[in-house]
Image (cartoon, rainbow, N blue to C red):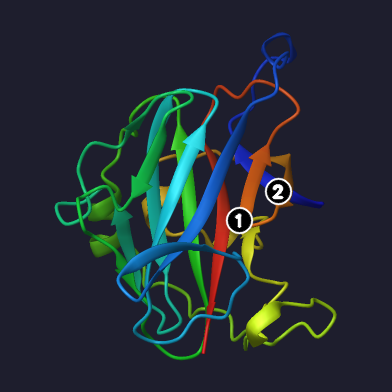
Amino acid sequence: MRRALLIAALVPLALAAQSQSMEIVLERSEAGAWKTIDPGLILKTGDSVRFRFRATFDGYLYVINSGTSGGQSLLFPSDATGRNNRVEAGREYMVPAAAGASFQVAGPAGHDVVYWLISPIPLDGNPASALSGGRAPRPAPKLIPRCDQSIFRARGLCIDSSAGPRNVADPAALPDAISSSAPNLQARELVIVQEKNRSRVSSSGKLTGPIVYEFRLAHS
C-alpha cells in the first residue's frame, strides 16, 4: 500500500464524513486486442494504451500529460479523445472516450507524468488555452525506467515499481492547465492500493474540491 499526496481545496470537517475513491486500470493493445497490464510495466515506443476509470462520486475529469520530451498536452477532453468529460458515480469510462481511440507511447525513454484532475464542477478556466499560452513547461524528470528484480513476473515482463499512480511530486511544477484553472490548491493525503492490475486512489473523507494525482507511464 502506498500513500500519496492529494491536491485539493480545503473543505469543512463536517463534510469529510464519507470515504470516496477512484479506480484506474491501464490497458495495452496486443495483437489487436486490449489487455489489462500492470501499471508499472515498462512500455515501448509505439505501444498503444488507454485507461479505464471509475469513481464513487460525480465530477468532471481532465487528463494532462507531461512527456519525456518536455512538452505538455491536454489528453482529455479534446476533439480527438471526446469532449464529454462528465463522470457519474459507479460508471466506468474509457480514456480516451472516442471509439477506437488510444494514446501512443512516444518520446525519449523515461516517465511520462499523466496528471488526473477531478473536479465536482466544470473548471472556470480553459485547460487547453492555458497549455498553449502559459509559461514554458519544465523539463520532465530524467527518470530512467528500471526493472525491479524483487518483483517476479512470468514471461519476463519488466516492472518499474516507481511507475503507476503516485503522489504529486512537486505541486509547484503542476502544468498551467491545472494551476491556472484550479488555483489555490492545498495538500491532502490519499491512499493508493494496487490489487493485481487495478489501482484504487481513495480519501478518508468526502471530497468537495478538485483533486489531482499522477500516473507515471514508464517507457524505454
Q: From what the image shows, is residue 120 above or below residue 173?
A: above
Q: From what the image shows, is residue 3 above or below residue 58?
A: below
Judging by the rendered image, the residue that carries numbered circle 1 is 171
* Residue for point 23% across, 60% down: 101
The foreground one among 92 and 12 is: 92
> What is the three-letter code of the residue carrying label 1?
Pro
Disc 2, disc 1: CB below 8 Å?
yes
Q: Residues within 10 Å of mark 1 (few under 14, many from 20)?
A: some
> What is the three-letter code of the residue carrying label 2?
Leu
Q: Position of residue 215 (x, y in %)?
A: 55, 60
Q: Earlier in the sequence, mark 2 or mark 1?
A: 2
* Residue for point 54% across, 48% down: 24
Q: Is residue 186 visible?
A: no
Location of residue 176 by image quarter: bottom left
Q: Secondary structure at mark 1?
A: helix
Judging by the rendered image, the residue that carries numbered circle 2 is 5
Q: Is residue 174 visible?
A: yes
Q: Secondary structure at mark 2?
A: strand
Q: Position of residue 108 (x, y in %)?
A: 44, 91
